[in-house]
Amino acid sequence: MAATKASLDVELEQWAKNSGFGTIVSSKPSGSSGWASFRKVTVDKPGAPEFFVKSSKRTCKEMFEGEALGLKAMFECSKGEDGLRIPEVFHYGDYADGTGSFLVMEFLNLAGRSDDYALGKAMARMHLAGPSKESGNPDGRFGFNMDNTIGGTPQPNDWTAGGSTDDWVGFFRDRRIGHQLDLAGDSACSKIWADIAPRLGALFEDVDVKPSLLHGDLWSGNIGSVEGRPTIYDPATYWGHHEAEWGMSWCAGFGKAFWDGYRSVIPEDEGFLNRKPLYDAYHQLNHYNLFGGGYIGSARGDLQSVKRCLDSMGA
């Protein structure tokens, strides 16, 4: 552990100097998770921000690259006074000696969740920000620059060929539900899905799905505020249908104020309630793959709801 700390100190000193931030004057431990350690770092350059540093013994590709790219995309898509307060990413990479990796971002004084109406509006603003080179999606497709993780589960994000509704249906069918079912190995869910999958497009008739930047794992534990402005963090970012953002709403506590804020910018599309169990199923399956237990029953119920809807449509 001592070698890793020494390596991080060397890397931070070199980064601060090369980036024009001067000399590090303070580097204090600020907690840890099961896979990374955190530090709050200050420098001597006047007017420079404080920095939040994550470090790990694992490689940057494994640990921080996906998070960094996700935060950079959310930062780009949330600019403006009524946008989300997303920390700016300054650096991410491996230690020169190969013993670990680190991520440097803006330090935010996080507080609890505050104005849910403002949160709803800010989420809608991010969802409406169009794909661009600056946000990492110059071709306007579904997916992301790299595979990442949702919790500890691998999340495949290969770009689709295009940005049409059909492209989205194929992406969610194969790289979201199909992928989680392969991991789960539950024969009952897989049997229902085999019936649903060929008919999935019927849920999206008359809906023009456009790529929106998604946080991807939005629940109450990933929502807060900074000086009264809403913020979200610990993303599993990708470009997808904006409705897919609400697949974790069963543990996010979104009430009337939130939805009033969101719907003031993005009205509800026809068939939203029919598609919601599909998006819920992805996260229920992921929770089963992470934790086991009764989540598989919830996933099965969601898929059965989708099947009943498709049956009633005669699809």
Image (cartoon, grey):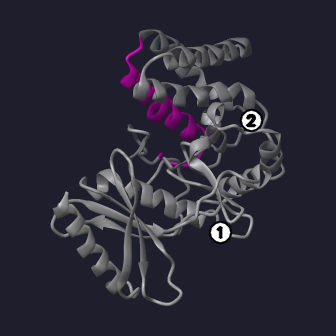
Residue at image location 15% in from the left, 67% down from the top:
97
Comparing 230 with 30, the one in front is 30
In the image, the segment drawn in magenta is 160-186
Residue 129 location, x and y as percent?
A: 66, 60
Q: Is residue 32 left or right of residue 83?
A: left
Residue 240 location, x and y as percent?
A: 57, 45
User: Which residue has dot 2 on it?
Assistant: 206
* Secondary structure under the numbered disc 1 in the rendered image: loop
Residue at image location 48% in from the left, 25% down from the top:
285
Type of the residue with mark 2: Asp
- Identify the image quadrant of the N terminus: bottom left
Q: Is residue 24 left or right of residue 50?
A: left
Type of the residue with mark 1: Lys
Q: Is residue 97 left or right of residue 5?
A: left
The answer for how far apart the CA atoms under marks 2 and 1 are is: 31 Å
User: Which residue has dot 1 on it?
Assistant: 79
Residue 239 location, x and y as percent?
A: 54, 49
- Identify the image quadrant of the C terminus: top right
Comparing 186 with 92, the one in front is 92
Q: Is residue 27 visible?
A: yes
